[in-house]
Image (cartoon, rainbow, N blue to C red):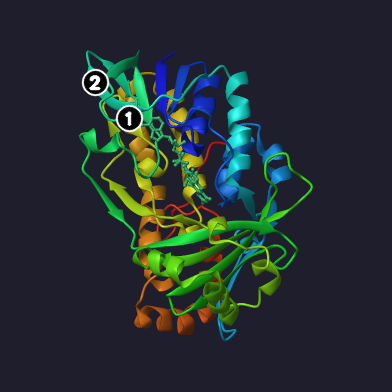
Amino acid sequence: MQRIAIIGGGTAGAASALFLARAGHHVTLFERVAQPSAVGAGILLQPTGMHVLAALGLLDQILAHGARNDRLFGTTAGGRTVLDVHYRLHDQQSFGLGLHRGALFSVLWQALQAAGVHVCSGINIARIEQRGGQALLFSRDPAPGSAEAVAGEFDCAIIADGTRSELRAALAIPQKVTPYPWGALWTLVPDEGLTPGSLRQWFRHAQQMLGLMPTGFAYQQMEQPILSLFWSLRVDRLQHWQEQGLAAWKKTVLELAPIAPILEHIQSPDQLTFARYADVQMRHWHDARVVCIGDCAHATSPQLGQGANLALVDAMTLAQCFAESPTVEPALALYSQRRRAHLGYYQGASKLLTPFFQSDSRIASTLRDIALGPICRMPVARQQMAMTLSGAKAGWLFGKLQLPK
Ligand SMILES: Cc1cc2nc3c(=O)[nH]c(=O)nc-3n(C[C@H](O)[C@H](O)[C@H](O)COP(=O)(O)OP(=O)(O)OC[C@H]3O[C@@H](n4cnc5c(N)ncnc54)[C@H](O)[C@@H]3O)c2cc1C
């Protein structure tokens, strides 16, 4: 059994800690936030992510907190259908689950203690050194001038510290991190049943995009269902949005979508949080005894709603690789090999699709408006789109993700 350090207690870190601790490894989880709490807005959990949570025995709790989304439906301001993807076209039983990120976080963290994971909160890991067949972790308070301290010595270190990882760059792995020019404003409002069972989007060219996603319930607050609202915005237009004021923004939104009752719940710009994204590409994900998983390894734009799912699949695959290959370095090399096809497809598809939904290109948006609706009605294409959304594709043609039962 290995002594394993995990850096980052988000979806990827917490899920892999659970799998590995339950397999008998000695797992220490470092999280830099001193009192991690249920933050964030809605995430879309896909059937693949739910498969992983079922393997962890956590799916029932997750389902109780989520809202079923059977369909992704998007139109132009004029009412023309641009996107119409039904999960059942991939599999009759399948659906997406709108879920508060905090609910996923809370359910995973509740399970850590019972699994025997040693959780060290409030520890910022600043550096990893590989020497003498060990991974040495050093922590440092982010305050300027603070000294470094040894956090521990391990057989393996799993970096799961998110898109803006500060540890990734020091690894001997060719990598590229490209911040996206576009981000999104997010908020949560009470769900009054405006878009039951659907993630609903409205588009004007590729410059304006409004999304509403039934999101279920905040953790253990089952009295009020919630809805996530997101509004696409170019990063360098954030200041203009702030200066313009809430009333002007609401007018723009209402010209795109009839959601006046929802907008009444937004009374201050502070209710909206701006999220930035980046594209992270790595040639492979392991460097001797260290491996990157989750957003740290392969963040993309959120267009395909795969962030939490890919992180969950990473966690399950990594545990499987440890089960098959009891020594660290071969297990991590096997992990990179096993994840290549699935991650390659979703990174490629996100990169290809994003300009059609978030860009200033009129050519891209016109092509999208003309072609995507009819494509959504073609039998093979709509099945492939449903499979893509479900998180199950592992190649442009026939590749399918194989997860352990
Ligand atoms: C605060 C927050 C809010 C988010 N909100 C949303 C949302 O509303 N909708 C959505 O779709 N996605 C959201 N995400 C992203 C989503 O959680 C991820 O895409 C997905 O779950 C994959 O998670 P991850 O574990 O790879 O990374 P993350 O969820 O980003 O987790 C990384 C963790 O690592 C910790 N960490 C970072 N550096 C260090 C370090 N040096 N030492 C120790 N710990 C470290 C961070 O504090 C964080 O807890 C959010 C992420 C965060 C961190």
Q: In the displayed structure, would residue 273 be above or below residue 267? A: above
Secondary structure under the numbered disc 2 in the rendered image: strand
Question: Is the residue marked 1 within 8 Å of ligand 1, measured from its CB?
Answer: no
**Image mark for residue 384:** none
Comparing 108 with 394, the one in front is 108
Quadrant location of the C terminus?
top right
Q: For label 2, count other residues whose C-alpha is less than 10 Å away and answer few (under 14), some (14-19) or many (20+).
A: some
Q: Where is residue 146 in the image (x, y as percent from the top left)?
A: 28, 23
Q: Can residue 401 be seen in this view?
A: no
Name the image quarter holding residue 354. Answer: bottom left
Q: Residue at x 42, y 84 (%)?
A: 366
**First along the sequence among labels 1 and 2:** 2
Under mark 2, the amino acid is Gln
Left or right of 160 on screen, residue 171 = left
Q: In the displayed structure, would residue 398 be above or below residue 204? A: above
Under mark 1, the amino acid is Ala
Name the image quarter holding residue 164. Answer: top left
Secondary structure under the numbered disc 1 in the rendered image: loop
Q: In the displayed structure, would residue 44 be above or below residue 82? A: above
Comparing 181 with 399, the one in front is 181
**What whole-number distance in Å separates the C-alpha atoms at marks 1 and 2?**
25 Å
Q: Name the residue under label 1.
A: 143
Q: Where is residue 65 in the image (x, y as percent from the top left)?
A: 70, 45
Q: Position of residue 312 (x, y in %)?
A: 51, 40
Comparing 376 with 157, the one in front is 157
**Image mark for residue 130:** 2
